[in-house]
Image (spheres, rainbow, N blue to C red):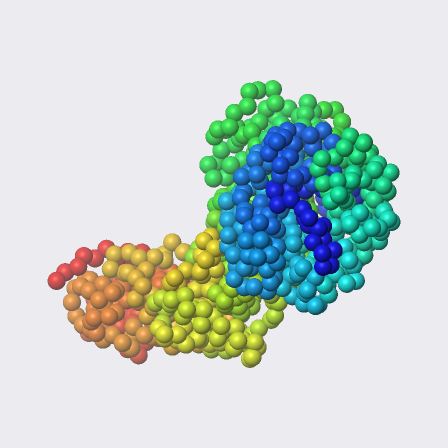
Amino acid sequence: MQSEKRYGAWAWSTGAIFLVVLMIGAALSSVCSLDNRVKTEAESCICNTTISSLNSKGVWVWGTDVYNAGASNLCAEFAQHGINDVFVLIKGVDGSYRFNLLDAMVENATRYSMRIHAWVICFDDESQGGWVDPNSTSYRNYLKNSIFIPLAQNHTFDGVVLDCIRYPGTANGNTYPITSFCQEVAQIIKFYKPGAMVGAAVMPEMSVNAYYYGQDYAEMAQYLDYLAPMAYTHNYNQQPSWVGTVTQYVKQKATSTNPNCRVWTAIQSLDDNGVYMDATELKSCIDYAISGGAEGVNFFKYPITSTQYGVIDQYSTIPSPAFEIQLYPGWNLISFPHIVFSNLSVQAVFKPVWGKFNIIWTYDALTGNWKIYRPDMPEKDDAHHFVNVTCGNGYWVNISAATPCTLPLYGTYVPNYDIQLRKGWNLIAYPLLTPKKVQDVFANVSVEVIEKFDANSSTKLSVMNASEELMPGCGYWVKAGCEVTLHFEESSGNETALTRVQIIRACVNLSNYIENYSIAPKYVSAGNINLTMPQILYLSSKVIHDIYTGSSNNTYNATLYDYASNPSGETYSSSLTTVQFDDMAYRVYRFMETNGVAPNYANSPVGKIRMWEIIYMNARILRWYYYNNNLPNLAYVKPVPGFKTDANSQYLGATANCQATNASIINLAMQIICTYSNQANNHTMNQNDAMYNAGEAVYIWVRDHKSYAFYYNTQYGAYRGIFEVSSLNCCDHTHCEDALARAVGIPALYRHADCQFSSGVYGHVWGYFYINGKGWIDADAIKKDGYFGYHYPIVTYHATYYELPFIIEW
């Protein structure tokens, strides 16, 4: 952190520097209780939520002192005086950067519950000749690609602080380069490290700060967790009361756009002339900063004298818990909100109630094993024992104490978390601090049963209904119908605004859902919004184009759009290059902005692509980006059949001579239902009438495109029968029907009987389709004037088959 007035640079060392921050603030507490339950001592958990501002002490440390003292000794010294936030310079004004000091401090600080932050000098770079234009695209990309992305991908840390993120007094009111860079860096860090903090050191010149330095406190605060105004009284020749004035001004501006943005005021305990601030002045500066609303105070710079430590030690360093769980004698079913613990061991987390419990159980849904922890036995970490806690798990805790006790949880709360549900029973956490209804959390998720703790039940469990709320601190049993990822996220101030990461995660879930069920759902959840398919089409297209063009945009409005009136296409199995799918994404979202409706199709180099296939392709593109941090070189167009059967799904898929999973057959089946059944393409795709129309379309196509030929048993099978041969017997007619029906998600069987024809009684085979809400429907395509549901009169019924057993005879 440089101490510089508007036009004159204050000398400072280019060595590695450490900032340790004192944050003093009051706790904000609220009480969350379990719904509709009598509060008794046998109850599992009454959740007292306490979200606190940071509460620590801090010191700036020059690099030479770090090298001389060593990271271990420095951490020990800081711990002796209650310091718990350390900011490590990884890039100095000389332009060089390295991460080894950060790694060393992280390694040594964990034992003291210190948080380590990476500190980066941004636009003052002597290797570039001094101050760099903050609007320089090449230098901004250099910082992101060489510093921030490798840092976030490869190193452990708790936060990032941006220094010299400004003009050197020559901004002339141009604030956009500074604000946008804050946004871009925050987006990178939060993507890789969702729980990490991002802050910035800012000049203290209040109303003229934006004009000279491009630092608009309110604009920057939108994307940052804290601002650190450098209220250096000696450099500015000011009295301690000025520290309070600066703090109050910055606080008011920052919280006007982001109520959660903290102000950590920097105090010059050792000035550039080597003069130490005396104890009286130091205490006055701290007190004025606190009275101005500071949650933290930074002392610039190390070493700190014993007299100064005497002042610093007067301020409490005991952090308020991020959350508290009330435990009662007997069994409790609990979980942990998404709190970043400095130590995940059972001994560390349960230390406040050590000696008051005798056993903890959890369940591993992946292996189907129960796992146990007993404080009276040697620790083991294996298939049946555990030593560390996990945020996503629920835990049965047996309290042996005769009276209730409180379990405080210390760390940083992160308001989002993903939980992977396995098929079958899962014992999970509710990782948020704000209750949510069951129907909102599990929207579009195949869940059969959700159970909560019930002290009055013999099993200690009761089934939850859709309107009940999941509560922080409580564990839940969830029986899932398939593997799925649950994404939890706190509500934002703007209920229609979504971040890029929220949209990308929604696309991950959407692509997984389509692959599990062969259908696009009616909604997909992002943040606290249930997005319709046209909305996700618009948002995914815009995000893809923004990623491709390198846009820093991170906020998207979930505008409502109408469904396409008549979705149609001509290709359902092909691929597009990155340039091609970006071009299509751009044209799609621009069309929707202009017309307020999703397009029926989009033109592409491989032909017209239907709305549903664009949605599925976009979702898979962003799923790739989520896991690889780049756009794929190719994106494949794959069909979305559009039907989820309510029963008999075991009669989908390929069998002998019925190649229902063949890409060419799927492609043709999609074209058939698009050509013959408009209703199967609109937003009623997953309704029963649309499924009926699609089945009828398959039947009509086979009836009208294939003539009858007499021969015994199977001779060609579905693929050859569909694409190579025009005249088929009843067996091959039915192979074609069943393959096309199954290809679009309609269960299909073979019926076999002796039937009455005009020329006599003969053995006969025909199709049998299952349609939601209507049951099994005959599809006998041999009769040219027949209809969907007709079959020749049965004389002797033989059997119904999933796989036709008749052999091929040539």
497 and 158: which is toward the camera: 158
Instruction: Estimate the x, y position of residue 412 in percent, counting from the top left.
Output: 66, 43
Image-based side of 281 in relation to 51, left or right: right
Residue at x 30% of width, y 62% of height:
662
Query: Is residue 561 shown left or right of residue 205?
Result: left
Residue 514 seen in the figure:
no
Residue 377 at what x, y percent from top left?
57, 20
- The image quadrant that residue 181 belongs to is bottom right
- Depth check: give the residue in front, 309 or 795: 309
Looking at the rendered image, the quarter that the C terminus falls into is: bottom left
User: Residue 271, can we see it?
Assistant: yes
- x and y percentages locating residue 443 in the rendered image: 58, 56
Outermost residue to the front = 273
From the viewer's side, name the closer residue of 423 and 784.
423
Q: Position of residue 753 (x, y in %)?
A: 26, 62
Q: How many marks?
A: 0
The residue lying at 47 percent from left, 30 percent from top is 383
**Which residue shows up at 18% across the image and 72% down it?**
709
Residue for point 73% across, 44% down = 272
64 vs 385: above or below: below
